[in-house]
Image: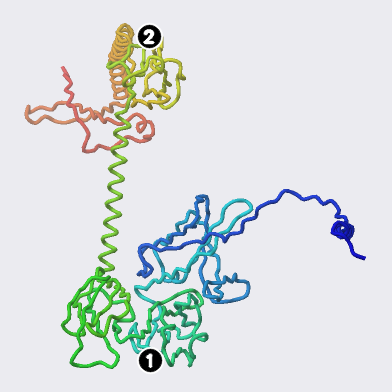
Amino acid sequence: MELSPLSVMLLLISLIPVAQAQEFSDPIKITVRERPPGVLSVSPQSWLTEGDSVTLSCEVTDSSTDWTFSWYTVVPYRDGLTGINNNGGYSVYVELLSDSSRGSGGKYTLSPAALNHTGVYMCRGERGEPALHSQYSNPQPLWITGESPPVSLIINPSRTQHFTNDSLSLSCEDQSNSTGWTVRRYTHSERVLDCSHWGSVTGSTCNISFLSTSNTGVYWCESESGEVHVSGSRSNDGDVILESPVHPVTEGHPLTLRCLYRNPNPSNLRADFYKDGSVLQNQTTGEMIIQTVSKSDEGFYHCKHPERGESPKSWISVRLSGSSGLTVGLVVGLGFLFIAILILMILLWFCKRKKDGDVILESPVHPVTEGHPLTLRCLCHNPNPSNLRADFYKDGSVLQNQTTGEMIIQTVSKSDEGFYHCKHPERGESPKSWISVRRPRSSILTVGLVVGLGFLLIALLILMILPWSYKRKTGEAAAEINEATYAQVTKKKKTNRNNGADADVTYAEIEQTPKKKAKKMKEKASVADDTVYSELKHNLE
């Protein structure tokens, strides 16, 4: 049976199943983009001498400014470390620095730089809550050479640049301890690896049989305590290398640089020598000598042959000699002394300025008479009438709090004598002034009269006592003499031959003896040398 087009259409429609009604939410656009990378840079340079300063700077390449930063160092693998997939397709392992928070502002400064700061650093930013982290930054190597390293990295051949396919041996030499040191390196692959990963170990020596450009890097000896000594090494595919010292050159010593060539022609050993990109010596020979090295000679050196090309750059470090260190110490000491003197001068100036400030105390020039009033005023330079208030002090103790700029003592007494000063709440305080209190004249006259009369009375008493005392002493002495004197008279008969007739003469023997001794005498005393005789003549008529 032949169907019409209309019948066919109706048949097809009947075969289509009825669709159930469905509901959809509003669409949301999701944008996926990579986390912004961190960029790490170093200033002034990545090669340093112990004691220098260096600053690592970290920034995130987006428009946000509220990033904080964490700082990491690249270390050999061990359990528990964070692995980062690098752009080269391999992992490096990082460890958060213990003092990472001090570089949260995007600047991490090492001052002074020490030997154990040698290493490879990375940073990462974060912001917001929950925290959004940036990518880890590029690795940034930092190498510090020592003034007096505790261990020496011995490189054979002893130069920092080498040709490919040459052999190289490295060992750590310590005068006090030959064990406990490991040779490590950092190469262009941005890895920090022990010798066992890139060379063969024979005793304490690390050997590389055939050098390639991948061996270019920085090598150092590291102990378990983190002490390091650094030396750069570079392998070159070209025909020109620079022969330069492996270790720092001591200031005052000579420095010899040579331009070496692969398959050298003795008749064509000439080169230009450069320091930090500037020519030092034009083509003369393949050697350059600096007779006396100074700190200013530190830098990157390379040489250039007119046909063979140029060498890689090598960093040459200069360390101070012992005498130079003493000189530096002396200069630093004098610098500190100068700073101390300057600070002292500033303090003296500040004290003088404070003393000559805006506040003085108005007080009387002459002593204040007792019983009179005393007025003190606190005066300010360029005073503000609405703000004339001050505290008043006597001998350091407050007398009157802030009310006005004036204090009055209505009746002064001797107890008011002392040191006074005032203090303004904003302008400061005045110097101290001594205020003396004197007594009135009437009081002085009265006191003088009383003192004069007192002296007169004392003088009269003395005059009355002296005669009485003298008289008393004189009477006692006379009484003692009278009482102590007695007379013993003995009659003796003597003939006076001169007159030719007999006469009776009587002698009186008088002996002066103290009374007390006289009472004790029981017998008549004999005549002694001190006996006084008186001749008594009797008239016998």
Residue indicated by mark 1: 166
The x and y percentages for residue 352 are 29, 34
Give above or below for 187 relative to 268.
above
The residue depicted at 42 percent of the width and 69 percent of the height is 142
Give above or below for 20 relative to 314.
above
Q: Quadrant of the C terminus?
A: top left
For badge 2, the amino acid type reads Gly
Q: Quadrant of residue 446?
A: top left
**Could you classify mark 2 by the number of other residues whose Cα lies within 10 Å: few (under 14), some (14-19), or many (20 or more)?**
some
The residue depicted at 28 percent of the width and 20 percent of the height is 474
The residue depicted at 57 percent of the width and 70 percent of the height is 84
Count of numbered labels shown in the rendering: 2
- Residue 338: assigned label: none
The x and y percentages for residue 504 are 17, 26
The x and y percentages for residue 166 are 38, 91
Residue placed most toward the observer, 516 or 313: 313
Residue placed most toward the observer, 466 or 64: 64
Mark-to-mark CA distance, 2 and 1: 110 Å
The answer to whether residue 70 of the structure is visible from this angle is: no
Task: Tell whether 469 sits left or right of 217.
Answer: left
The answer to whether residue 263 of the structure is visible from this angle is: yes
Q: Quadrant of residue 374?
A: top left
Residue indicated by mark 2: 371
Identify the secondary structure beneath mark 2.
loop
The x and y percentages for residue 362 are 32, 18
